[in-house]
Image (cartoon, coloured by chain):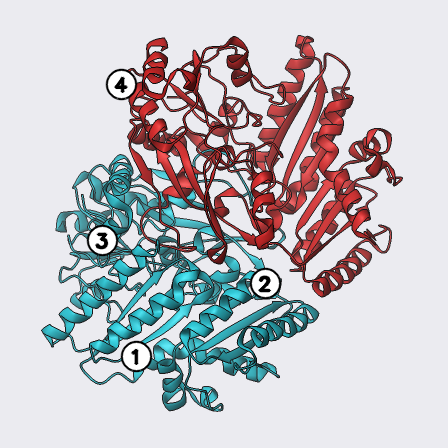
Chain colours: A red, B cyan
Amino acid sequence: MLHAAEEIARSLGQDAVSYDDDVLEHHGHSDWSTSNSPERAVAVVYPRSTSDVSAIARICSRRDVPMVPFGAGSSVEGNFSQPHSGICVDFSYMDSVVAFHPDDMDVVVQPGVNWVDLNTQIASAGLFAPMDPSPTATVGGMVSTNCSGTNAFRYGTMKDWVLNLTVVLADGTVIKTRRRPRKTSAGYNLTSLFVGAEGTLGMVTEITLKLAPIPQDTSVAVVPFPTIRDAAAAATELIRSGIQLAALEIMDEQQMKILNEHGSEAVRRRKWAELPTLFLKFSGTTEGVKSDITRISDIVHATTGGRAPFHFARSKQEEADLWAARKESLFTMASIRPPGTELWSTDVAVPVSRLAEIIDWSKRECSKLGIFASVIGHVGDGNFHVAMMYDPKDAEQTRRVAQCVHQMMAMALEMEGTVSGEHAIGIGKKDCLRDELGPETIGLMRQLKRAVDPKWIMNPGKVFDW
Amino acid sequence: MLHAAEEIARSLGQDAVSYDDDVLEHHGHSDWSTSNSPERAVAVVYPRSTSDVSAIARICSRRDVPMVPFGAGSSVEGNFSQPHSGICVDFSYMDSVVAFHPDDMDVVVQPGVNWVDLNTQIASAGLFAPMDPSPTATVGGMVSTNCSGTNAFRYGTMKDWVLNLTVVLADGTVIKTRRRPRKTSAGYNLTSLFVGAEGTLGMVTEITLKLAPIPQDTSVAVVPFPTIRDAAAAATELIRSGIQLAALEIMDEQQMKILNEHGSEAVRRRKWAELPTLFLKFSGTTEGVKSDITRISDIVHATTGGRAPFHFARSKQEEADLWAARKESLFTMASIRPPGTELWSTDVAVPVSRLAEIIDWSKRECSKLGIFASVIGHVGDGNFHVAMMYDPKDAEQTRRVAQCVHQMMAMALEMEGTVSGEHAIGIGKKDCLRDELGPETIGLMRQLKRAVDPKWIMNPGKVFDW
């Protein structure tokens, strides 16, 4: 493996390769992740172009050395860990906007571009890329995990926003999946095959993203409910109404308590009801938003018999404060955890009608463990996250938390759900994926993987095993 | 091949197999299609379940016999023709709704279900499947061509509405691509690999479709413009405004002339301006539609300096009449063609900013041929159809029409477009696909095909060659 790194250094230049221990550690482990591997890459390499990446792949392929693509390191299932060591390919220097086509509403970027920066750059054209994962995420990683976030309810997931990809295959071959039309039915949908493949089929080196027009206006409302079930029932009514909400999120009573006690100054301007709470985002024309708020408020009133007070933002400042409560929640929770404890954060999705049931069940199971756990959900998509606080040095507690997560996955599958709504599989959920899809379907994925990467050197040990 | 058919008859019953010449002809040739093959299947077989289909595949695989899936026969690129003969698998008897989950907004159907019937069945739940191809199309065929239609501008294409697929592979293995969550990032996106694969990777035997809420209200407006370029420029402004139109279509002056002369009674109630005309569909809440109409009318007024008269439907009857003009256009044109002539209909898509240019160019080239040609476009997606009337017995004219279509494809590719926006590749556009994607990308598709269907017996001769 070291020989491969040295050959890459000769080809790309010495400064394109690092063997520094801190660098290797930073690229091999994440405190945010629930799944880490003790192994580390032998070197981190820094390509600056598709042809650099192709050179890396040709060298690694000739020497049978694993390649592990690395974006921002913000994934949480060990997606970039290196259980088989190898070469870590860091895309930090491939961070250019290659071409912006405002009239076509698309943009061509390199994988190292951060999505928040991108949206700042293109905002003056009235356009934006709608996916909103971790603010640190880069487009390459967002493609590879098929990320989403709060905007998915209105805008779908990453796969819906990628027009084409340039990909370097394991042997160094460069392919482009499509040209640049917004719509096509020409040939196999290779774009969607690489989106969410977690770098196991090749390394993405250029991405054309569809963009959406920035809505003329937005607003936010919050509605506390007596129980999670009441909240979920109301959410179902809202979805079925056909009113196009921009986001529909849920936070449980634990999360709301944390807001009151530990939220930022902006968030603590308000005294939050410590009850399961729906967060609604509206977007559209100014008139449209107004009329949507009226109709949604009526539906909530009718569904709950007036028992759930509907509160919408009366100013832009209040709108920002209300939404901040939702966006800060994970960070707030992470910041208050006692020294030595970790957060085990997981992510499942079920058909929408089963959401209340599985959230209820998960909360009951967690409370049996006597540990702090709380729920945030993209309720509009049937997708929710549970974060459990535990002490990784307490082996018995760790085992029980892991078991609880496993049972949650089993329950999601019983409900015809999925073991990963938006975090992908990585090394953390391979068993669960097998349970979800069964041996025939995994067998087909394996056949495809072998066809594209016969030496099994692209990000090995992820998604499923040989 | 006949032995395979006989073995299928023994396995599924004699009435599951037909050797009738008329039946074979009907399954091997289409007047609607621009691409047909002179070969015919040796038999048409009629499975009634996934396990029937699996039995057929096991028999054909053992005997190396091609299988060609057949839906409604409404595709237009020879997608179901049988250039290598074999067994035609007709899904007419697999036409059940397996399960309807209104609370989850999805429905599980067999491939032979017609989409118009499906939407009629589920309308009382306030839900619909939004793709609108030919009214005769069945869901299986819609999946296999990644169809779309006028609703694609708002709702995307077929790939965006398929939650999971049950697929019988070439060797008879049955796989299910996913369970039933609305959102997932678990494993490779096999669903999108089979959507648009035209049955070359396997036969789809069950489909779970996402459904959308039926909008509370709709309306339609028409706006004639002096030139196609003016119309396209206005369309770009409308798209960028961020107002969510339900559809944005264009018809050229030839189409409008046909409406005046040959439209149905409802359509001829109105005297149409014989100019390039935008057809706009609005949908949403009643208030939202009203406010959208006002804003769109303002934008059109501002963009054109008031030269384009914006007319919106003032009653439900008028709304239906206006939209009928758009929906009837292809049939009207087909019905008035002189005896002996055929329509060569083709479909390309380009980045939206290039649409006016390529439509202009196409119309000029057609007029040089001295034949009747007209354009209908899904302008919101940069996708348009040209229909050319020609005499297939006139070899020189046929050659020149074919050449003109080929040049149109080349022009679309120069503009970074695609050779097929929604009709797929079939046997008609294999050369064009090679031009579009290049040998490396086609090479990857071929590797995937070989991995899944090593004997190359699933719908051979389509999309690309061995």
Mark 1 vs mark 2: tell me if same chain: yes
Q: Chain of mark 1?
A: B
The C terminus of chain A lies in which quarter of the figure?
top left
Residue A450, x across and y down, in percent: 31, 28
Which numbered disc covers residue B241?
Answer: 2
**Residue type at mark 4?**
Arg
Relative to A332, say whether B147 is above or below: below
Q: In what element is the residue under mark 3?
A: helix
Residue A348, x across and y down, in percent: 60, 34
Q: Residues within 10 Å of mark 3 (few under 14, many from 20)?
A: many
Relative to B218, say whether B339 is above or below: below
- Dots 2, 4 in contact, CB < 8 A: no
Residue B349, x across and y down, in percent: 37, 60
Relative to B336, say whether A428 is above or below: above
Q: In what element is the residue under mark 2?
A: loop
* Residue B190 visible in image: no
The residue drawn where x is 22% and y is 56% is: B427
- The residue that mark 1 highlights is B334
Which numbered disc covers residue A62?
Answer: 4
**Residue placed most toward the observer, A427 or A138:** A138
**Residue type at mark 2?**
Ser
Q: Chain of mark 3?
A: B
Q: Residues within 10 Å of mark 2 (few under 14, many from 20)?
A: some
State how far apart marks 1 and 2 are (Cα). Answer: 36 Å
- The residue that mark 3 highlights is B430
**Residue type at mark 1?**
Ala
The residue drawn where x is 36% and y is 88% is: B262
